[in-house]
Image: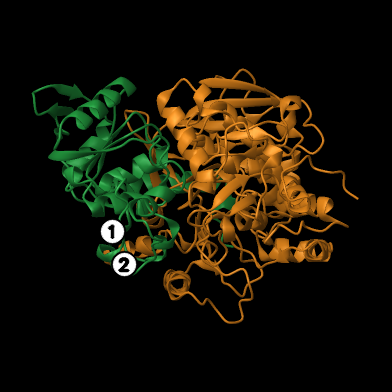
Amino acid sequence: MQPFTRLDGLVVPLDRANVDTDAVIPKQFMKSIQRTGFGDNLFDEWRYLDHGEPGQDCSLRPRNPDFVLNHARYQGASILLTRANFGCGSSREHAPWALHDYGIRVLIAPSFADIFYGNCFKNGMLPIVLPEPQVQWLFEEVAAQPHYSLAVDLAAQTISTADGRIIDFNIDPFRKHCLINGLDDIALTLEREADIRRYEESRRLLEPWIFSET
Amino acid sequence: MMPTTLVEKLWRRHVVHEAADGSALLYVDRHLVYEVTSPQAFEGLRLGGRKPRHPRTVLATADHNVPTTTRSQGIADPLSRIQVEQLSRNCKEFGITEFGLADRRQGIIHVVGPEQGATLPGMTVVAGDSHTSTHGAFGALAFGVGTSEVEHVLATQCLSVGRMKPMLLRIEGELPAGVTAKDLILHIIGRIGTSGGTGYAIEFGGSTVRALSMEGRMTLCNMAIEAGARVGLVGVDQTTIDYLEGRPFAPRCEQWNQAVAYWRTLVSDAEAHFDKTIEIDASDVKPMVTWGTSPEMVAPIDGCVPDPAHEPDPVKRAGMQAALAYMGIEPGTAISALRPDKIFIGSCTNARIEDLRAAAAVLKGRHIAATIKLALAVPGSGLVKAQAEAEGLDRVFIDAGFEWREPGCSMCLGMNEDRLVPGERCASTSNRNFEGRQGAGGRSHLVSPAMAAAAAIAGHFTHVPESR
């Protein structure tokens, strides 16, 4: 996995609560058997005026001028600022894949849906939970200042504004460790082979039917 | 011993290694796999030179992408076909049991697992699909995961999981006539909101839940995720055990007796501590219809669409305004004035035999309104379809003007040909009314099977009529 340590990036505000993963990447693009190539279809139904299907050249499609990702001032953004319960609904990892492919590395919101939150870490992305008033303040700052960027430091667990204000954030220490070092979760678990074997042996005695061949 | 919640009992039983922060490496007993969220996981295994640790714990079937019309011609959409064929190739290569399209056991993975007895009490069950919460109805710890975790479980049979706080939804009393488990869960989501369960495992308890069939309990747990909870649970009782006896993957003979003795302990102890408890009076629940683009935007059949102007929270108000604009509905509209164009009876929420019976009871001797463009009945599995046909339900649906289809996820998410066109309104027994969920620009109203049938006949949402 790609490590994440720090990022100095442009912020794009998506001022909606309960953004679901169907909106992040509509179902027709989930027919791909790849992990990449979803970025052009990120927020497809909000971003384009026509109906999107896989395999189109998205540079030729009519864009929705009202959608924030299409505003000139937010081009090149790598930090998505949004509202509560972002990523609710489907467990599709295609949602973080699409955000990552587009260039988003950090998401800031008052809350995230559980499955989406976990999926971000598997893809070298950092979802940051901040209290509602701080998120509201950031929305106001982004609106007031063109090319508003933030510096995120995972080791220090801080977000710094250009004028030197610092916002602290919390993160689970194990997730932080894995993200900073870009660790492969599967390799980590396989280091516990002896534990897994021991577990299987003792459980087999308690619930043999779980281990029978069917 | 300290009184313990069901989720805590299941958790402890599966801990392979516990971290200092309370999270744990949990052992996974059953892994359900389908075509959309697994190809990248199998590819990851190949790239890493790894193999599934215990292929026998995996059960696969294609459901999201499959046509519900005749299958003799195969799958027309080349991308869907590649994905379904890739699942078969992966299962063959890694020695995984798959119910292919020609197999009568094929169907929606969350219908197939329980139907086969592949979901058992006391198990941990995962799948790359958020509605895996369904299987919690059996006293299992079941939750949806992403594709990276699908690969992780295949390779290691384990998963790192953070603690979930136990929440009890205690529902007491008798549901009024015409009110079902679907109405109950929509009522609950309307009350606690779509993030009310975030971070929690929701146990559904109380006399109302005890009186529900396994199908009803599955409907409740299925939509726990729509309240934000990855896990929904119901304690084991005689209803659970009766449902499982004799199922193909269930234990037999001496092991059955041993299993049942253990399963009976899979209930929350009296006095167990829950981080949150919510009491619901079943007699307050009415037939429910969603009016917006989130399952929490829901009202009873005799209610009206709320006015965003009365909502004090600006973020919520903006959400309601956007939803009403998308849905093409004015504030204050009576729910019973909403007129669907299409009807969808199906999905992992409501495509089991009991759901089809409930809809058929309303449809029998009646016909859908002239304004209904399409009414689909999509059984949850080939075996549900066969049972419904043995009971003559297919004739009831067809005589009423419905199309009787092959099993799959179908119009719940419209990955196959079954979808809404922009502006179309649908009465749907599925689980998500998100923008574009059932087709770009489509407008979904989530309801019970009986309400979908009633709306099909009347041409608008209405109280469920007495069966003829």
Report the mark closest to the observer, 2 or 1: 1
State the residue in front, A175 or B171: B171
Q: Pointer 1: residues within 10 angstroms few (<14), some, or many (20+)?
A: some
The alpha-carbon separation of the residues under discs 2 and 1 comes to 27 Å
The residue located at (55%, 32%) in the rendering is B202
Is residue B424 in view from this perspective? yes
Question: Which residue is rendered at x = 59% and y = 39% of the image?
Answer: B291
* Label 1 chain ID: A
Residue B441 location (% of width, % of height): 49, 53
Chain identifier, colour orange: B
**B227 sits left or right of B387 in the view:** left
Disc 2 + disc 1, Cβ < 8 Å? no
Q: Quadrant of residue B206?
A: top right
Find the residue positioned furthest to the front: B330
Tag 2 secondary structure: helix
- What element does badge 1 sit on? helix
Numbered circle sitting on residue A40: 1
Reading the image, the residue beneath label 2 is B46
Q: Position of residue B396 (x, y in %)?
A: 82, 61
Rendered position, B187 above or below B159: above
- Which chain contains the residue that carries disc 2? B
Q: Which chain gets the green colouring?
A: A
In the depicted view, which residue is nearer to us: A63 or B380?
A63
Place of residue B317 in the rendered image (x, y in percent of width and height, measured from the top left): 46, 28
Q: Position of residue A51 (x, y in %)?
A: 41, 61
Identified by mark 1, the residue type is Asp
For label 2, the crowd category at 10 Å Cα-Cα, with few meaning under 14, some 14 to 19 and many 20 or more, is few
